[in-house]
Image (spheres, grey):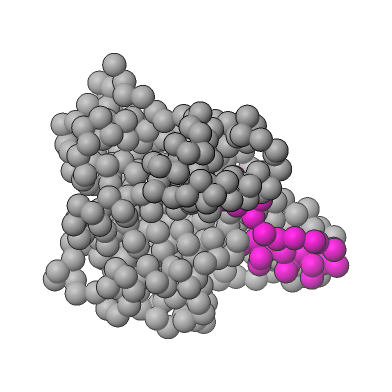
Amino acid sequence: MSASCCRFDGTADDAIAAARRALARDGAIFLEQPEFFSPGRPVLALRHADQLDEAQRAAEQALAYARQRGATPELVAAYWMNAGGAWARGELATAEADLRQALEIARLGRLATSELVVRALLAGVLVLRGELTAADAEIEAAGLGGVPATARIPVFAFSIALAARGQLRFAQGRLEEAAADLLELDRLSKGWGVIGAPAPPARICAARVLAAVGEHERARTKAEAALAHARRWGAPTLLSQALRTVATTTNGAERLALLEEAAAVVDSSPARLARAEALADLGAALRRVNSRADARAPLREALELARRCGAAGLARQTFDELQATGENVRRWTPIGVESLTPSERRVAEMAANGMTNRQIAQSLFLTVKTIETHLAATYDKLGIHSRRELPEALGNFSTPPSVPS
């Protein structure tokens, strides 16, 4: 059984075993199947099984091979894999930077389908970063402002487009449009079952939008089916998402119990954003039943996590909830590495790897003054004073992966 089949029909343990078989022999799959999606399936399976460190090592291996070969489709795929891992871990600025790199390569290589997929995924990250106007611009640039022509777009790409546009419309409050996209995504997923990013599966997306438009009975049916699947699958992140979705269809003690379980199952998960979302939902629910004192602890942690993930949209919502409990909170804006723009992050990584300002400027076709400005902004956001402190402040993500021998 392949990793992609296990991903949807078996259990997380099945998928992990299949993915490891596919990735054996020092990741030879990335050399033997040099195309956009197929070699990424075991990496995707590992991510959905919450094996994020293992998935990231495989993605870095794919990127190392792609850089060595210099093949455009492989580079796009490798950056997509890296971005997905960063997204799953809640490192949204890193995910954005990787997707922008993939987008530039796909655009220069005239890989139309790959460009559409990457733009859609980038829009999804921008929604989480609270940049709805920028996300809308990516949807328009991909030609997805209206209804995409399914006959001209592969089902994989079309489904990712539906997921991204549906989530954007949901965030914009355009609920009827969001429902149309996410219900169609759910219908399509019954045949093959993948979104292709660390976003919730199609059934969960559909249930959430149905609850938002007031169709609680249909929402409950889909949410309970998603929960049954998540329990069978056995990975904490999916289970937490499903529990939170069922909670949107109920009230009172049942809702609180579901949200408490949703937060508990990702208590030690490497998926920081999933934990932030669960804690934010729990804190908001507690506040709404007038348990304001009890709501503060989960909301405080959710706000801290959301800020560190660069999830400005969630951070702002959680900030508002925390203030509504009577607590005085000064800031909600992102902090740390995830507050860096993609340009700041790229310059900082190059500086951390020992390049001078002049070398960075020449490499990126920028002025030395621009590099100095980027670095000054980076030092301020990271709370450091010199480039010597950059490697530690960046979390040692600055060193490029090497090709396995």
Q: Position of residue 38 (x, y in %)?
A: 21, 43
The answer to whether 91 is drawn above or below residue 34 in the figure is below
In the rendered structure, does residue 332 fall within the stretch colored magenta?
A: yes
Please say whether residue 300 is visible from this viewpoint: yes
The answer to whether 393 is drawn above or below residue 290 in the figure is above
Q: Judge by depth and name the residue closer to the eye, 174 or 312.
A: 312
Q: Number of numbered discs present?
A: 0
Q: Judge by depth and name the residue closer to the eye, 286 or 58.
A: 58
Q: Is residue 229 left or right of residue 111?
A: right
Q: Is residue 109 left or right of residue 267?
A: left
Q: Position of residue 36 (x, y in %)?
A: 22, 46
Quarter of the figure that contains the N terminus: top left
For the magenta stretch, what is the residue range?
A: 314-340
Q: Judge by depth and name the residue closer to the eye, 321 or 402.
A: 402
Please say whether residue 308 is visible from this viewpoint: no
> Could you tell me which residue is drawn at 45 percent across and 44 percent down?
361
Q: Position of residue 289 (x, y in %)?
A: 77, 70
> Could you tell me which residue is drawn at 21 percent across and 32 percent down?
69
Q: Residue furthest top?
A: 405
> Could you tell me which residue is drawn at 51 percent across and 34 percent down?
356
In which quadrant of the rendered view does residue 51 lie? Answer: top left
Q: Is residue 136 left or right of residue 24?
A: right
Q: Position of residue 88 (x, y in %)?
A: 47, 47
Q: Judge by depth and name the residue closer to the eye, 5 or 217.
A: 5
> Could you tell me which residue is drawn at 65 percent across and 44 percent down?
379
In the rendered structure, does residue 298 fall within the stretch colored magenta?
A: no
Quarter of the figure that contains the C terminus: top left
